[in-house]
Image (cartoon, rainbow, N blue to C red):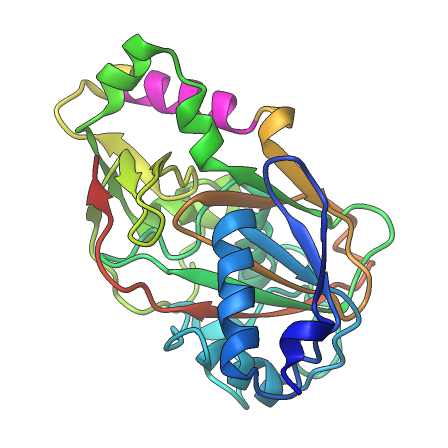
Amino acid sequence: MSLLNSIKVSKRHPFIGAEVTGVDLRTPLDEDAFDKIHSLWMENLVLIFPNQLVSDEQHIKFANQFGNLEVHPSLAHRSTRNKEIYRVSNVDESGNIIRAHDTAWQYINLSWLWHTDSSFRSVPSKGSILHGIETTREGGNTLFANMYQAYSHLDADTKRRVDGLYVVHDHDFIIKQSQELSKKSDKGSYDKLPPVRHPLVQIHPVTGRRSLFLSPHTMDYIEGMERLESRKLLDELIHHATAEKFVYRHNWTNHDIVMWDNRCTMHAVEPFDNTSVRRIMHRVTLVGDRPPMSA
């Protein structure tokens, strides 16, 4: 019998986020169930699968049904057992909390900024799938913003102003967001990634809908604008896009799996006491199909 009959869906937010139950992600999806989940993903942008007791290997196999997987450029945060697993964690692989102000600790703190995964690549990520292995009770929630809605709620003048603009994204710009890390001689080991340019407004390759493409932790400047004017416009768009009405807050419980579309969302982590509170999250990231298409 097809898994399709057992899948149940409930909205978590009017614009973004739905919970999906009745599916065990440890086993392969049949064709009907895959089509259903993919359709729900495109419709809701963020899917929450509660109580999924998956291993890293099962996590990878589930994700591979949706595409190939990236290897994150930060060497310190790659799993030594499965290179596709990015450890979004303040706990090392020996089970110890990473020392405060260690380079790896400072880098992972930058996930608290709003961002879109892999915006520093010429072909950004299609989506990400995050497994909450050891979650927090206070703080550590993940916020997701709907970038379709952010674009559609711009006034006509602003839409005309931003359509056709390009933004330079740079992995090194992430490091600059941390005053302490940026001053260190050892800023960590990363794959070399040159700056790239992406449209400020993009067209989704599956839905055909327009969305803002913002990733504050990598956006350096808008091409063809003075730096101050560029920064002012980007900051205004970020403020607009992260308004409460566009945002779903996910309160984690252990073994939630959350899957989101990086082509039409942004996300950020709410701060928590990461010097003493453990948070272990494993993420896999889907390789993008093509460079973003300008509106």
Which residue sits at x=55%, y=90%? 81
Q: Is residue 191 left or right of residue 35?
A: left
- The magenta segment: 230-242
Does the rendering let one see residue 218? yes
In the picture as drawn, the residue positioned furthest to the left comes out as 224
Q: Is residue 258 left or right of residue 213?
A: right
* Residue 234, picture quadrant: top left
Residue 249, percent from left and from top: 70, 42
Which residue sits at x=36%, y=44%? 218
Q: Is residue 244 left or right of residue 152?
A: right
51 or 200: nearer the eye?
51
81 or 11: nearer the eye?
11
> What predominant SS class does the magenta segment belong to?
helix
* 58 w.r.t. 184: above or below: below
* 243 w.r.t. 51: above or below: above
- Which quadrant of the rendered structure holds the C terminus? top left
* 163 w.r.t. 194: above or below: above
Which residue sits at x=57%, y=75%? 33
Label tally: 0
Which residue sits at x=42%, y=44%? 264
Does the rendering let one see residue 85? no
Is 233 in the magenta?
yes
- Which quadrant of the rendered structure holds the N terminus? bottom right
